[in-house]
Every structure is written in C-alpha cells, then in structure tokens.
Image: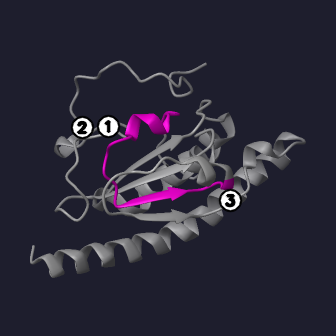
Amino acid sequence: MSALDDPRPPAPDTAAEPEGRPAPGEPRESAPSGAEGPIRVLFVCTGNSARSILAEALLRQKGGAAFEVHSAGTEPKGIHPLTRRVLEEARIPTEGLRSKSVEEYLGQHFDYVITVCDRARQVCPVFPGEHESLHWGYDDPAAVEGPEEVRLAAFRKTMLAMGERIGQFVTVARRASRERRLAQGT
C-alpha cells in the first residue's frame, strides 16, 4: 500500500505550498461562505476511492487558484489504482490526493457540497452555513468487473463525463461568486 492509498492522515509536512496555500487534500482554516477567498468545494462519495477523487483532481486542474477543493468518503477505503492511472494518463497531478473521511470536514464551511454517488447522498452529513448542496450521480467505475481494459474504460468514461460537467461548473461557480461579491460590495 502506498502513502496515497493510506486512509490515515499524512505526517505533517513543514514545506509550505506556493502562495501560502495548503497542500492538496489538506483542509485550511476557512472563512464563512461568501467571504473573499477561493470557492470552497467538497466532493463526497462512499469510498473516496474513485469518483470523488477524480472530481477533486479535475476541479483543481480546471478551476485553478479560484477553487479550494476537497473530497471525502462516508466509508473511505483508499484510492483505487485505476483512479490514479487515468489521472496520470491525462497528465493531471495526483500528488497530495488521499482517501479521507467526511468526518475530517465536519464543522467546516463550504460553498458547494457535491455528492457523486447515490449512497453518499443518502448518508452525507449536514454541513453548517450557507452553501449549495448538489448531487451528480455517476456509476461507480470501481464496481465494473472484467478484464483490466474493460475496467480501465469505465474509469476513463467516468472521468470524461465528470470533466465535462466540472468545466461547466467552473464557469457557473465563478459567475455566482462574482455576483455574490458585487452584491456584498466587496
């Protein structure tokens, strides 16, 4: 098992991220929703092994510094090797990604909490403050059986579908953030 598959929190790292940002997957102290700063998004699924990890990595890539992105599972079980493989094929960074429990984020404020599987939608805890709760249901590519090429195709299909949706989400979320700031006079 690699460090990325280990569901336990990593050892503290003393190296600072550029621009004072936390490392990918690490929570930061956050202001309540609507305050200046990045748009905070949490993707939730059951195992935090495929769909939510894919969504986290894709939004980091497509949204850049405008977003602070996290993912978690209601029953985390480590990152699926094919999740990492399809991300690496697409040249999307995987360092810092780890399977985490939704409990790590309880009490934190998010602008968007997005469930990406039906089971997580049913058991996802309530997060405080004003935020959008969205549900994007995707079939679990990790549940696909058969030869590796069949399973890999399922991961690629899920990543492609999520990538298209996340591209649209970035545009809408940035617009909503600008409108909120204008309305607040900031």
- Between the C-alphas of marks 1 and 2, the distance is 6 Å
User: Left or right: where does residue 60 sit relative to residue 87?
Assistant: left
Q: Nearer the viewer, mark 3 or mark 1?
A: 3
Percent x, y of residue 31: 19, 52
Closer to us: 125 or 175 = 125
Percent x, y of residue 167: 48, 70
- Between the C-alphas of marks 3 and 1, the distance is 27 Å
Q: Are marks 1 and 2 in contact (CB under 8 Å)?
A: yes
Q: Quadrant of residue 21?
A: top left
User: Can residue 25 be seen in the rendering of this structure?
Assistant: no
Q: Which residue is mark 2?
A: 17
Question: Which is more N-terminal, label 2 or label 1?
Answer: 2
Q: Which residues are magenta?
A: 95-118
Closer to us: 82 or 72 = 72
Q: In what element is the residue under mark 1?
A: loop
Percent x, y of residue 47: 63, 38
As drawn, the label of residue 138 is 3
Q: Which residue is mark 1?
A: 23
**Residue drawn 59% across and 47% down?**
123
Q: Residues within 10 Å of mark 3 (few under 14, many from 20)?
A: some
User: Left or right: where does residue 7 sit relative to residue 35?
Assistant: right
Q: In what element is the residue under mark 2?
A: loop
Q: Report the quarter where the N terminus lies.
A: top right
Question: Which is more N-terminal, label 3 or label 2?
Answer: 2
**Residue drawn 32% across and 73% down?**
174
As drawn, the label of residue 150 is none
User: Can residue 80 be seen in the rendering of this structure?
Assistant: yes
